[in-house]
Amino acid sequence: MQAKACHNIINIPPKLLPPVKLPSTAGQITLPSHVPRAITITTTSPTHEVYTPEIDDTITAFWDYQFLFVSQRSETNEPVALRVVEGCIPSDFPSGTYYLTGPGIFTDDHGSTVHPLDGHGYLRAFEIDSGTGQVKFMARYIETEAQAEERDPVTGKWKFTHRGPFSVLKGGKMVGNTKVMKNVANTSVLQWGGRLFCLWEGGDPYEIDSKTLSTVGKFELIKNSDQSLPVEDSKKFNGDFLDVAAQILKPILYGVFKMTPKRLLSHYKIDSRRNRLLIMSCNAEDMLLPRSNFTFYEFDSNFQLLQTHEFEIPDQLMIHDWAFTDTHYVLFGNRIKLDIPGSMTAVCGLSPMISALSVNPSKSTSPIYLLPRFPNKQTNVERAWRKPIEAPSQMWVLHVGNAFEEIDDGTGNVNIKIQASGCSYQWFNFQKMFGYDWQSGKLDPSMMNVEEGEEKLLPHLVQVSIDLDTNGNCTKCSVSDLNPQWDKAADFPAINSEFSGRKNTYVYAATSSGSRQALPHFPFDTIVKLNTADKSVQKWSAGRRRFIGEPVFIPRGTKEDDGYLLVVEYAVSTQRCYLVILDAQRIGEKNEVVARLEVPRHLNFPLGFHGFWAPNNSGLGNLQKIGSRFQDSWSMMEDKMVKLGQ
């Protein structure tokens, strides 16, 4: 058990306060004018809590949020054993490594700050050995081309030279700076085919050495892939005008701003039944045109390209995450439009490049595109996939947990269900994500919260149900809360990955307990487990002034919820990071926490984005062999199903 803390707290009137500084790795942050300042002097051991005076919860809430994004300039070239502060690693825990990526630095040494989405990728690895009960930790920056330019290898000093899509530099060149697309490899991480990669929304992934976390280099995953296999005939809906506009934009975007022609999305999918990696790209110029061009690629475990399909859609969409089923790629479209004034200031360097875009609430519905995954095998080829299914809800989709199909044996009709997190167009704002104020270069968490009565505007978990007849035509589409018993803000839906693309019962997500007076909705402090069958809800809360990121499910047995959840806990009250292991079947019970392991204070890291669980090679190899055998059987079953359908 942890020792109880002992505190000596001294309150100093705000007028007597000197400027308040975070640790030396963070730079200086100034409170907004409407937030009073206070300081606490404590005499504690490093493991004891450091309380902020409870004069106004707004003070504590503001500073807690800042500490979630404190820059970390330290790295670990050698593994560091983590101290177990609660429980132990269970003997049936599958040995492997949990990789977590996200931005690592937000402030340079010359006065510039960047949006969290523009922070250089900082990869963390938790190697778990259930045999010895040890967890070893490593953390290193991904050495991208931009990182090599912006960080001095000798002094370790940083100087931001690239604006990034979401930031404007103060201490560097601002006007006329065309260095925009800096691939920071900070969004997601993937192990596939025995190789480790970090991905970013807009460029090639970077390959990482899984043992040392050193950067191998850029991996051109989709280079020449369009020519490797026949591209599905998209029968272009429009010819001349948009093609001419695209030809004008290409030399500007590709040549001047160095954008990648095919913008690879950071969210990939793994079809475990076929043992396939699915990725998706879109054309850079389509972000500024009233059309969208999406290309899907499917690879086997040796990175052999198995198929590619390209779809041109007459709608200007932004896709961050997507889903797949046995027969479709599922795109929940977020409508955007070109902002003319914003694009002018963005090109000049007076505002972030993302200012060129804005949400497009022109329709009260949300478009869902069901794109044929295996056109030659599907029976519903008559369906015009270019015409979207309009869901009766205007919603900006952030992340998709799963999608699957159910076939009515009597009629042959198909029901498709999509589980996702989405928010209102009224809440989502390109220039206010994460509460970042590009004009001041600081974080204002109040941007992320809403007034009482407006909670439905926030990200929440939904389920979309689509009924298709035997010709693939939509007969009904509805949107409802994924679980009506849980209506709090939530994101990062996660499932047992073995159920990706097929019917699942359980969904896990990061959410808020709502117990905080100031900033009750963000940041998240709770894991919720939703049962979609009986609508029951179980939850685990990290505790007061402790926040969490994305949960990751680790299978243990054959039942869907038989396994563990991994989540990183950010205890800003103690300035500590912990790896927490939860028993997924005991969420909501007193013994739900299996183990909590402490990261050394000097290696505390900022809030992460997305993670990946990689079992040890032996287990991964067996899984791939089983997947390969199943792939052959599944293909034979598909052919039989098609024949029966015909």
Image (cartoon, rainbow, N blue to C red):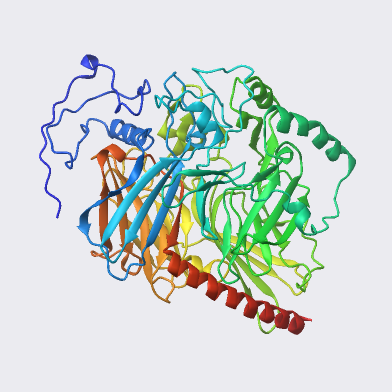
Q: In the image, is 204 to the left or to the right of 581? A: right
Residue 180 can be seen in this image: yes
Residue 39 pos. (x, y %)? 22, 25
Residue 149 pos. (x, y %)? 53, 27
The quadrant holding residue 10 is top left
Residue, x 76% and y 38% (percent of image)? 289
Residue 171 pos. (x, y %)? 49, 17
As displayed, is residue 15 above or below residue 454?
Answer: above
Mark count: 0
As displayed, is residue 151 above or below residue 366?
Answer: above
**Closest to the observer, 80 or 252:** 80
The quadrant holding residue 520 is top left
The quadrant holding residue 60 is top left
Residue 485 can be seen in this image: no
Q: In the image, is 560 to the left or to the right of 259? A: left
Q: In the image, is 320 to the left or to the right of 91? A: right
Residue, x 30% and y 56% (percent of image)? 135
Residue, x 71% and y 40% (percent of image)? 261
**Closest to the observer, 486 or 111:** 111
Task: Pick the quarter of the image with the N terminus.
Answer: bottom left
**Closest to the observer, 252 or 22:** 252
Task: Pick the quarter of the image with the C terminus.
Answer: bottom right
**Closest to the observer, 398 or 129:** 129
Q: In the image, is 38 to the left or to the right of 255? A: left
Residue 620 pos. (x, y %)? 47, 67
Which residue is farthest right? 240
